[in-house]
Amino acid sequence: MTGTVAIVEDEQNIRENVSFALKREGYQVESYPDGLAAWEAFESSLPDLVILDIIMPRMDGLELCRRMRTLSETIPIVFLTSRDEEFDRVLGLELGADDYLCKPFSMRELVARVKVLFRRLSLLNGRAAVEEEELLTIGDLVLDLRRYTARWSDRTVPLTVTEFMMLHALVRRPGHVKTRQQLMEQGYPHDTYVSDRTIDSHIKRIRKKFSNADEAFDRIETVYGLGYRYTEAPDS
């Protein structure tokens, strides 16, 4: 699947190099020198995927990510960040980014991650070849494995694709502990560079989204020193 990729980066050299690499792979590319310029364009029409720097003039990447998530919970967002910006990187993931790369990064790796996210997006949009709808139901939770959507007590819970994949990994075997490494492999199957804090940030965001749907939600437990598990209701 190819589509439109927006590059939001104040360093012209990086913008041009990333644009060239993606166009060579068949993607349409839109480039913006700062967050405000990108936001003004996104208010009219969203791209299919966004590559986003954190530190930029006029509007930084964290604020742009927050605003974008008010328009779409599913558009893939990849952060570009300096190695000493761990706090901002984790905060970006909590705001809803799907992935990140540390500068300086390999252009080949960036293109590979873009391809992975587009494959997930293809599944999310129902363009994959699936013969019938697949639903996984555990108590009040319903996961649509074809559309990558979640419902809790008939309320839609908006998840990014990465969040959905991690939740699915927990839900498949309720009561069983999933280590951070196992969740990493589920959420980032083609990536060996994701840290434990990245996984923790995604779990925190998943919990928050379900708590917004139901204040009493407490099904995702932390097993200290090991990882996380999904628990069923006592009467289920």
Image (cartoon, rainbow, N blue to C red):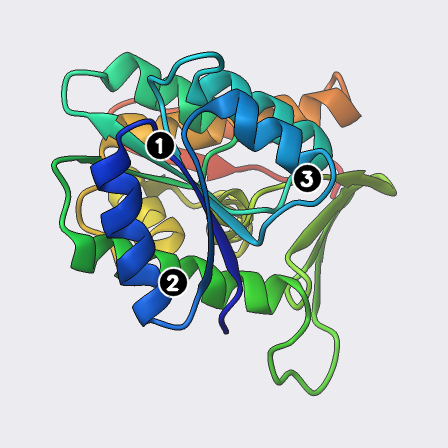
Q: Position of residue 103 (x, y in %)?
A: 16, 33
6 lies left or right of 17: right
- Residue 46 visible within the image: yes
Q: Which residue is mark 3?
A: 72
Q: Which residue is mark 1?
A: 9
Disc 3/disc 2 C-alpha distance (Å): 19 Å
Q: Bin the neighbour count of mark 2 within 10 Å (Cα to Cα): few under 14, some 14-19, many 20 and up.
A: some
Of the residues shown, which amino acid type is indicated by label 2? Answer: Val
Q: Earlier in the sequence, mark 2 or mark 1?
A: 1
Q: Are marks 1 and 3 in contact (CB under 8 Å)?
A: no
Q: Residue at x 34, y 71 (%)?
A: 25
Q: Residue at x 37, y 57 (%)?
A: 114
Q: Position of residue 47 (x, y in %)?
A: 59, 50
Q: Nearer the viewer, mark 1 or mark 3?
A: 1
Q: Which residue is mark 2?
A: 116
Q: Bin the neighbour count of mark 3 within 10 Å (Cα to Cα): few under 14, some 14-19, many 20 and up.
A: few
Mark 3 secondary-structure assignment: loop
Of the residues shown, which amino acid type is indicated by label 3? Answer: Ser
Where is 43 relative to 89, above or below? below
Q: Residue at x 54, y 27 (%)?
A: 37
Mark 2 secondary-structure assignment: helix
Q: Earlier in the sequence, mark 1 or mark 3?
A: 1
Q: Bin the neighbour count of mark 1 within 10 Å (Cα to Cα): few under 14, some 14-19, many 20 and up.
A: many
Q: If the image is split into quadrants, where does the C terminus sit? A: top right
Q: Position of residue 4 (x, y in %)?
A: 53, 58
Of the residues shown, which amino acid type is indicated by label 1? Answer: Glu
Q: Residue at x 87, y 43 (%)?
A: 154
199 lies left or right of 208: left
Residue 90 is drawn in which quadrant?
top left
Q: Nearer the viewer, residue 60 or 173?
A: 60
